[in-house]
Image (cartoon, coloured by chain):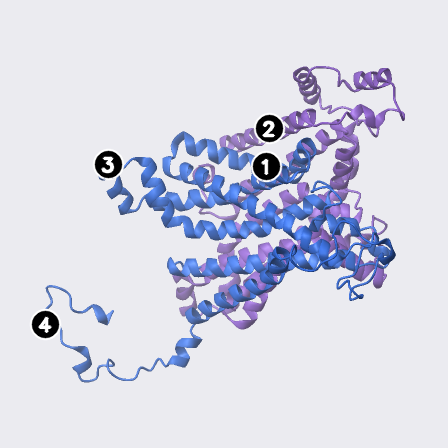
Amino acid sequence: MTTSTNLPGHPQVPNLAEVPGSILGRDSAVTKVLLRRSAAARRARYSTVKIWVGAICAGVVVIPVVLAGVLPLPDPIVGALSESSLPPFSAGHLLGTDPNGRDLLSRILHGGQTSLVIGFLAIFVSGLFGIVAGAAAGYFGGWVDTIISRLLEAQMALPLLLMLLLVVALFGPSIPVITLVIAFAQWPEPARITRALVLVEREKPYVAAARVLGLPKFSILSKHVVPNILQQVLVVVLLLLAQAVLLESALSFLGAGVQRPYPTWGGIISDGRELFVTGKPWLVTVPGVAIALLVVGVNLIGDGLRDRVRRAKGDRA
Amino acid sequence: MLKYVLKRVGQTILTAFLAVATVFVLLRMAPGDPAANYAPPNPSSEQLAAIREQFGLDQPIPLQFMTFLQHLFQGDVGSSFFFKRPALEVVMERLPYTITLAVASIVVTAVVAIPLGVWMARRSDTAPELGANIGTIAGQSMPDFWIGFVLLILFAVNLHWFAPSGFDSAASIILPTVTIAILQIALISRLVRREMVVNLASPYLTVARSRGVSERSLTWRYAFSNAALPVVTALGTRFAAMLNGVVIVEVVFNWPGVGELVVNALKQRDFPLIQATVLVTVLLALVVQLIVDLLYPLMDPRVRLGEASS
């Protein structure tokens, strides 16, 4: 680069702006419009677009769900049978009611609280466990790595959904059990990413320097290596939230969710499945839209953030 | 080569054993008495005990497991509590439906996702690509059972193009295939895009372009043949996962496959049937994985077996 010409040992570098024919000091042929159209600038813009679209999609779902207790909604569990199976946009029931006369909007928002609590708890547990296991495997290597890597491989070969259904049947469909089951399904992903990143990171000079200074292995790992890779791993963990919400709804759909009458998204769809044939499709379509909007939102935010982190780290792909 | 194959086959058998053993232990720990499901209404405790004895459930669990293993080596997984005939036979009847669905889905996925991914890579960072990108994100964000229901509502209930469920004709496979393929296309096309972007920007491609190789040939013959390895791996993994994982879609469409069978078997606590299903699907998935691994050296001369096994 021309800006780094004043190197020590080369004192007589001329000021390039004063050299005849130099392009420095003149208007560049690379105009601002061209710069804006460049691939790099577009990439930056598109990641912003993704993050914003994602934030809007997720916000449309999350904000009402969080406020469900405050909003003037009918009871989600006890309905009036006189108001059964109303279509959407009925008076007092924006999204209609189910055959028990329960308000669908209220059920979706209250159900969303359960789904979101499970989702956040699950990614907290799986993220924590995955990062600790992955970092240990990557940094210490040897038998630690062998055990953790074998566990990761073994889990891939298991029929996961079936196992999860079994465990829920075994311990009962309570929120802690479903949370742990989802966390168990998800820990390999952050573990694998963390391991891969730590493998690269531990070869860097600052780690060697820390080792030479006599820092204990554990504090090199926790205070120096992990903070440097945390950003990339957390994006992956955020993306897991989308998977957790989907998995929770799938489990509920197969009957291994939080028990009736308490609503969850998968449970509401499952309740509606026998009814869409009889001309009440909104009981299935509307709750699915809520799930899809939230998951699209989270995925877009995660994807946009990942683009940014990658660019900051100078990775091309 | 032979050593590598033997090692992989050994790993496969070990993993299958692990899966079956885990399921066996989990099943025995599960609450609820299977005998109660198969006894006459309001059974006496003698009747229940008789059924338990008939199913071998009165034995201690380690002994049950030993008996189970002994029979397993003779190719016998036991008789289904519900169907009253060998569980393996029941599973094998359902297996062709699941395999058909999985094959159809993976073919549709490959045919759509590869060109889509290549297109996205070539139009990288343009507005249409951003649209396709968001589209693939949406594709992997919808619950699969919900996609199934929406397709049913649209095409079966409203348009009457297809029968709403089950398997009556060859056309019945279309909706479940589309349901599965939407998610898979989203995942695979993004992988193809990622791989192709890297390869399209490589120096060897610039060299080839400077020698006048056509863009079409650059894309497919040069870049894609290098991107193909991870893509084939992913397709193999997805296919293997499908053999275990189309449970939900089968339930939605009442598709008479293994997934639907196992969900009912779980409800009825039909232990031998669950075990037979796990054994067969896990083995099948592992064999697919093994075949993909063994294809590596054929597909890519760079892959030496030493690297592949390390």
| Labels 3 and 4: the sequence-earlier one | 4
Q: What subunit carries mark 4?
A: A
Of residues A237 and B177, the one drawn nearer to the viewer in this rendering: A237
What is the CA distance from the residue labelled 4 to the residue labelled 2?
A: 73 Å
Query: Which kind of residue does numbered mark 2 sit on?
Result: Leu
Give the residue at mark 1: A157
- Dot 2, how many residues are within 10 Å of its Cα: few (below 14), some (14-19), or many (20+)? some
- Horizontally, residue A312 falls left or right of residue A271, namely left
Do the residues at discs 3 and 1 belong to one chain?
yes
What is the CA distance from the residue labelled 1 to the residue labelled 4?
A: 66 Å
Give the residue at mark 2: B18
Q: From the viewer's perspective, is the residue at label 3 or at label 2 nearer?
A: 3
- Horizontally, residue A169 falls left or right of residue B137, namely right
Query: Which kind of residue does numbered mark 3 sit on?
Result: Gly
SS under mark 3: loop
Q: What subunit carries mark 3?
A: A
Please tell me the colour of chain B. Answer: purple
Do the residues at discs 2 and 1 belong to one chain?
no
Q: Are marks 3 and 1 in contact (CB under 8 Å)?
A: no
Q: Are marks 2 and 1 in contact (CB under 8 Å)?
A: yes
Give the residue at mark 4: A12
Give the residue at mark 3: A214
